[in-house]
Amino acid sequence: MRKDNYDKAKDPKTPFKKELHNRNIHRNGYDFKQLVMSCPELGQYISKNRYGNESINFSDPHAVITLNRALLKHFYDISCWDIPENFLCPPIPGRADYIHYIADLLGSCNEGNIPKGKAISVLDIGVGANCIYPIIGNHEYGWKFTGTDIDPISVASAKKIVSSNASLSELVDIRIQIKQSAIFKGIIKTGERFDITMCNPPFHASEENAKAANDRKRTNLNSEDGEGSKLNFGGQSNELWTHGGEASFVRRMIDESSSFQDKCMWFSTLISKKNTIEGVYKTLRRVKAVQIKTINMAQGQKISRVIAWSFLDKERQKEWVNERWK
């Protein structure tokens, strides 16, 4: 979990999470009294911060997981949610932003009307053990999701979340990616099409970089236990780092997407590092993407971006919409 997407409670004089998307239900921060009503176990982790406001210790992974459980139950009607120990615990407000921004992108192809319902099919690359994007996207817009992952434990965990919540069981399909080097190959079936793909790629280029970043998080959160080598916010190697970092992963994704030009209307991915963008655009030009969009997202002090691309021009996208959404 990236700390700066889970901002510590701020001085009440400062607007709280105003940078989030205007449809993001987490813009007003956390109402802990309401959350405890939905999830009583959260109460044991709540205390007053230095501004006299109720908060939790964001350096405590158990507190953060319980907060997630409360948020998912209170806002997204998810009654059963958990993740295996040491797996990535996602910052829900930031994850929701990605969903809302791609909803806007799909709406731009539909005369400004955001499409809702199970006619919309989304492919989530790297769904993770937490299954967070299908949860949010299904609740907010009613979309169908296919989530993929290379890790069998993540796949098993995501499947358990889906099967344990009736709202997801008919609309979310979880698949394992057998081939470690593949992204879309072996996942997109014959005759299958997706309206958009999404991905939160591994950020770091090595395990050492991931551990160093975790140490900085712990320092920023004023952690006192001194276990700097422990990834206290969770995350397995495939979740946190890949050879070459996000730049290498995204370039590989773009290259492979060119083999599925007519299978997906839009491809998209998060980009965390600003210096990744130039190489991504160079690769997109090389594969002759017809449309390229950069969507800026601001969460606290962190700026991240969604890069979206399509091999279909606007006229072909209009035909796609009329065929699948109308």
Image (cartoon, helix red, strand yellow):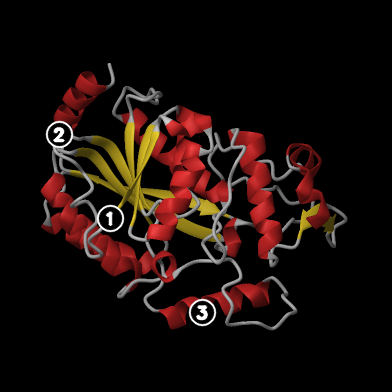
Vertical placement of 84 versus 117: above or below? below
Quarter holding the C terminus is: top left
Give residue 201's mark. Answer: none
**Residue sitting at x 81%, y 41%:** 33
C-alpha span from label 1 to label 2: 18 Å
Amino acid at the residue labelled 2: Gly
**Residue sitting at x 45%, y 57%:** 304
Badge 1: how crowded within 10 Å, few (<14), some, or many (20+)? Answer: many
Nearer to me, 39 or 220: 39
Query: Nearer the viewer's eye, disc 3 or disc 1?
Result: 1
Give residue 211's mark. Answer: 3
Question: Mark 2 near mark 3, Cβ–Cβ under 8 Å?
Answer: no
Q: In the rendering, at what x and y percent does residue 315 appear?
A: 15, 28
Between discs 1 and 2, the one toward the N terminus? 1
Between discs 3 and 1, the one toward the N terminus? 1
Query: Nearer the viewer's eye, disc 2 or disc 3?
Result: 2
Amino acid at the residue labelled 3: Lys
Dot 3 falls on a residue whose secondary structure is: helix
Quarter holding the N terminus is: bottom right
Q: In the rendering, at what x and y percent does residue 241 appear?
A: 39, 71
The answer, for residue 13, to whether it is visible in the render is no
Vertical placement of 273 versus 254: above or below? below
C-alpha span from label 2 to label 3: 42 Å
**Left or right side of 58 for 273:** left
Q: Quadrant of residue 287?
A: bottom left
Give residue 177's mark. Answer: 1
Badge 2: how crowded within 10 Å, few (<14), some, or many (20+)? Answer: few
Give residue 191's mark. Answer: 2
**Residue sitting at x 30%, y 74%:** 244
